[in-house]
Amino acid sequence: MSKEELKKVSDTKTTKLFKKGETIFEENEKLNGVFCVRNGVSKLSKLSPNGKDQIVKLASKGAVLGQRSVIVEEISNLSAVALNDMEACFIPKNAIVNTLNANPNFAVEVLRHMAHDLKEADDVIVNMSQKTVKQRVAEAFIYLKNNFGEDKNGYLALTLSREDIANVVGTASESVIRIISEFKKKGLIKTFGKKVAIVDPQSLNNLAEAI
Amino acid sequence: MSKEELKKVSDTKTTKLFKKGETIFEENEKLNGVFCVRNGVSKLSKLSPNGKDQIVKLASKGAVLGQRSVIVEEISNLSAVALNDMEACFIPKNAIVNTLNANPNFAVEVLRHMAHDLKEADDVIVNMSQKTVKQRVAEAFIYLKNNFGEDKNGYLALTLSREDIANVVGTASESVIRIISEFKKKGLIKTFGKKVAIVDPQSLNNLAEAI
DNA sequence: CGGCGACTTGAAACGAATCAAGAGGGGTGG
DNA sequence: CCACCCCTCTTGATTCGTTTCAAGTCGCCG
């Protein structure tokens, strides 16, 4: 995206604040713009017919929410909820569409971004269908470390409830809890309240990738 | 995509033929163009660390293979294998890239297409993680009917091996076989050799969507 | 006709979900 | 300031679905 375009889009921005737990948009909602995350983390999830919701993606600083729906002009297929206090800027639909049609570079940029998301989604599909819950939990911790980092004490910077972890991994929260305590016993992780710290990244990684 | 663009791209096409079982491209292969399916069906799959491969998508007439990798200029993350005799045209990378940069409409068109794939991928993620194998098999049959139709005798036009069904659903082939015989016993489907016909679409659908 | 691959079935082992009950912790109201 | 309540976390026991291994059958192609 060129600088001028960036500026032009920038001008149409409105900053919005969301508190922890607040909904940014819901499934099947008509979106008239996208949200660009400035701060905080949002979970993107989809309700399954069985009543559980599956977290499809975690979006943090720099991520754009709702672009898929705006581009295809469909209602949203996911809901977005703030995991901590968030700051996001809103870019109205027509600003997106205009820039898209006027500027091939912008379109290609968005395309690249979406292509990346698509690859990640493919990977998730394979993980979900071929790996055990234990492997997926291990992987989730590695993912959290790589994408959101650790605090000064080595605990994962993004603290998820057991329930949220379960919804990322696609399992029951009790299963997550059991696996966490097993990992603790093996010295792979340690916990403090609901915070989790990775102690032995290598072993955790081996576990996640095991044949 | 405008007619002129279509024509320009068309000129660079080369038609290739693939026989049943033949590989179009493999995972981690560098692609110097995309394949546009004219006839036949291809499975797009990814090898999991445990040695099984997961079919992520079935691509038939009109589908484009490899566009994601070409656009992001990465090696392929999936492999493509012909499920029956196929005819596909090859469009070299630079033809794509040039058109992409020159023509916003084309870029937006591709974007729409990829956005659609992304939504489907999200749905697959939810299905994989929240539904039982039985539900997923039921859904797979419905999908096959809706996307590839039935022959004159009511059998699914695309016949997959039990193994391929298992790889779509993400399970063991024995499980698929057991579920198929259960469906037969209940009168939901009938079989003839490895061909499958849906007898009671409604019940099958209910089963797939059950809470 | 013989052999090979795909399909089918059975039994046992395993992983994960579910149900049930209790422990901890943080916030609220008395 | 304390007691209480609610919500989340934790653990145990049981049930269920699915995988795995093993053996056997079917059908197709050479």
Image (cartoon, coloured by chain):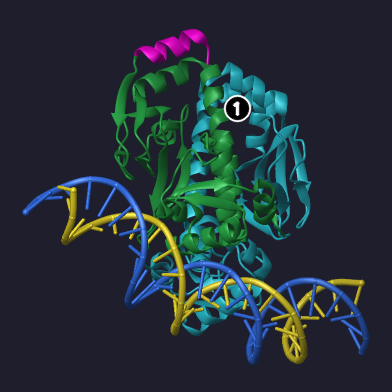
Chain colours: A green, B cyan, C blue, D yellow
- Give the vertical position of A156 relative to D17 (above or below): above
Q: Is residue D7 left or right of residue B85?
A: left
Q: Judging from the image, what secondary structure is the residue with disc 1 in?
A: helix
Asked whether residue A143 appears in the rendered view, the answer is: yes
- Front residue of this view, candidates B32 and A85: A85
Q: Name the image quarter holding the C terminus of chain A.
A: bottom right
Question: What residue would you read off at disc 1?
Answer: B6
Q: Name the magenta segment's main secondary structure.
A: helix
- Give the vertical position of B21 relative to B33 (above or below): below
- Front residue of this view, candidates C2 and B164: B164
Q: In this picture, which residue range is highlighted in magenta? A: A1-11
Q: Residue at x 53, y 69 (%)?
A: B133
Residue A100 at what x, y percent from top left?
A: 46, 21
Q: Is residue A46 left or right of residue A210?
A: left
Q: Amino acid at mark 1?
A: Leu
User: What is the quadrant of residue D7 in the picture?
Assistant: bottom left
Q: Residue at x 77, y 36 (%)?
A: B30
Asked whether residue B2 appears in the rendered view, the answer is: no
- Front residue of this view, candidates B90 and A196: A196
User: What is the quadrant of residue B9 in the picture?
Assistant: top right
